[in-house]
Image: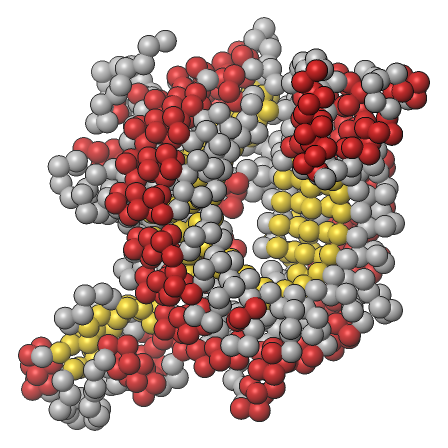
Amino acid sequence: MASVSLLFVTLLSVTLYINIKSFILWDQSQTFLPSLSDSVLMDRRFPFKVLEHIFSFVDSNEDRNSVSLVCKSWFETERRTRKRVFVGNCYAVSPLKVARRFPKMRSLTLKGKPHFADYNLVPDGWGGYAWPWIEAMAARRPLLEEIRLKRMVVTDECLEKIAASFRDFKSLVLTSCEGFSTDGIAAIASTCRKLRNLELRECIVDDLGGDWLSYFPETSTSLVSLDFSCLDSEVKLSDLERLLSRSPNLKSLKLNRSVTLDVLESLLRRAPQLVELGTGSFSDELDPEEISKLTKALSELKQLKSLSGLWDLLPEYIPVLYSVCPRLTSLNLSYATVQMPDLIDLLSRCSKLQKLWVMDLIEDKGLKTVALCCKELRELRVFPSGADLDETDVTLTEQGLVSVSEGCQKLESVLYFCVQFTNAALVSIAKNRPNFRCFRLCVMEPFAPDYRTQQPLDEGFKAIVERCKDLRRLSVSGLLTDKAFEYIGVHAKKLRMLSIAFAGDSDLMLHHLLSGCESLKKLEIRDCPFGDTALLENAAKLETMRSLWMSSCFVSFGACKQLSQKMPRLNVEVIDEHPPKTRPDSSPVERIYIYRTVAGPRLDTPEFVWTIHKKPEVGVSRLAIR
Amino acid sequence: MAYEKVNELNLKDTELRLGLPGTEQVKEEQDVSCVRSNKRQLQSDNEEESTTPPAKTQIVGWPPVRSYRKNSNNNNSVSYVKVSMDGAPYLRKIDLKTYKNYAELLKALENMFKFTIGEYCEREGYKGSEVVPTYEDKDGDWMLVGDVPWDMFSSSCKRLRIMKGSDALALDSAL
């Protein structure tokens, strides 16, 4: 149905006049009278009600953004019917504008810090505060039901505000967020009576104890998913047991590490309907009777499709998991410190597996088993087990990934950490799997060439981008010259996100990317030897992208100023310990973060972030403003 | 604006410097990433084997693993050591914390590398075995596995080496 109405919509749009870019149209929309009268709306080719009905089938926000560009009445109809709002950069637009634009908003998703914040490249205090958004929505959109935040600073105040303001609040999903404590979580648990989802994914939480769990209402809860895997402290077993007993709709439960193995059986007995389970620690001593009980409890989870947690999994407990393996579509073993033979034992039973996260302990041999047994595999992530770069595990090589690419026809997403690689392997992988959508290879040795031929990995990545026509996301590594980026610019036409570290020779590299990659939305670069010329030459491109991050490159302060003055709708942020104006214009800055915005420079920058002023007539001494 | 292809060794042309052209490059005040200076080093050493940059383990945010994951893996409950066996092409890795005593460890090594080991005795070591398990301790000395109590061993062992053949006999007779 959706495709039929989209076709209909597309046909219509051909006959209508398509004009300005969405941001500008949206900006101008603020001049529309808030009460656009019905008669004006009725005066279009299709009455509002018909359009509204058609648009209700348009789910994806990308499609909705296109729809809103067609003409004013479509813009109006679309904005009044959009329920799920996604803002990829919380500084690209003001909360007030978003609140006003979408009166029927029920779900809001926001992303804050740049992706490289995950790797400690963004200093603490940079920004990404949730409060202005929560405040704005609380005042204007009290019917909001869902808030999903990624890489944002969320305080207890925010959580309390959410609990107090949205009476139908159903879903809170925080990914890689920080700034709040378990008190805030308690507020949500106790006040949001209709709560369905409470998920804390890899957040940094000020853990004041496990009491928060007891704050859920005493009567039955409407919980569907609960994820507290990132918390440290112990929760009371009795609290957890009682919660599970009164949460009949719970489908997804992810425990934290401090939930010990001996209590798992008792929990599972109270939630046999689980579809997703994240266990706690899997390493305590159990006697044979306990083991047998646990095995039985796991086998009773007839709907279980996803298994994670498994911290410190001991080899002797692998058989306990046998019964769930044949049904699993998702398995996260990336915290399970078991060796290859045990992994093989487990994975050879997982014939339905679609998603596998594992550590490099799996070795090439283990991946060969995956290639043989897990024919449904779509996503593979292999993480390094060694803490330091010194701890190189030679038994995971490029061959592992080659095997999986050969055996798993449906494989489309890969994240692979490996010490070194070869062009030949990359070429094989590309030939085997032209259906990659996401290819992230991290050769852990910076500047490592093809270890057999000593050549750069240019040819290998060329094969990847040439053959994988649908590639959306790419991370490159190893020794790469400008040539590699010329290939990427020429071939990777659907590429949206690209991550680069320690690569390239000159400005040409950036030039190839910015002039060639038509669909590029996010570009993040660290430690590459170029900057100014390519940036200024391709300034217009930056407005078509969400953001550009560059750290430890050769971008001068002068170029930042020029860029900012040239492009009114870009925020050019210089993140530097030393005030840029105390150094010559030619001196390189530590980090820059450039993003398009209709909100102007932000006002919450810390002392180490400098947003370049737009007006050249403002004198040199005041060119950088805080 | 015409682009000239820049020779990959010729970084100097695109290099931003403080100071006038022709003068020595002034040491940069900020030292955000030691790898930048390492890169120049590697480029000029093009002819030689690329050596490990000395500050490899100090690169901020590299490898790109989330700190959440690094912290999870970095705690006390895992203790990986490399195990090499003379004549075997690959090294292996084991987590010492999964074993409670020497018997378990030796059994696991026997399984991993397909050898049999004799009985340990304090006076004569592993007499009669085809292999001798040794380890490198915190001080960098190579020791015989089994001499010290298990706990002391598991906290001081940095890596293991299974010696065989003539090396083993030499060690044996030295005891």
Q: How is the image coloured?
A: secondary structure
Side of B41 where A75 appears, left or right: right
Q: In the picture, which quadrant includes the C terminus of chain A?
A: top right
Q: Which residue is situated farthest in the top direction here?
A: A617
Residue at 33%, 72% in the rendered image:
B94
Q: For this view, does A67 lie left or right of residue B163?
A: right
Figure check: A459 above or below B137: above
| Lateral position of residue A514 relative to residue A188, left or right | left
Q: Quadrant of the N terminus of chain A?
A: top right
When the figure is inspected, residue A67 is found, relative to residue A362, above or below; the finding is above
Residue found at x 43% / y 20% = A515
Q: Residue at x 53, y 70 (%)?
A: A326
- Quadrant of the image occupied by residue A144: top right
Image position, residue A304 (x, y; %) = 62, 68
Pick the front one: A125 or A130 = A130
Where residue A133 sits, quadrant-wise, is top right
Residue at 85% from the left image edge and 43% from the top image edge: A143
Tell me where residue A126 sits by quadrant: top right
Q: How many marks?
A: 0
From this view, report whether residue A326 is shown above or below residue A601. below
**Residue A166, horizontal then vertical, whole percent:** 85, 47
Q: Is residue B110 visible?
A: yes
Q: Residue A2's x, y, as percent? A: 70, 38
- Picture coordinates of residue A447 (x, y %)? 28, 40
**Is A514 or A234 nearer to us in this picture?**
A514
**Between A611 and A519, the one nearer to me in the picture:** A519
Q: Nearer the viewer, residue A467 or B6?
A: A467
Residue B122 appears anywhere in the view: no
A220 up-or-down from A394: above or below: below
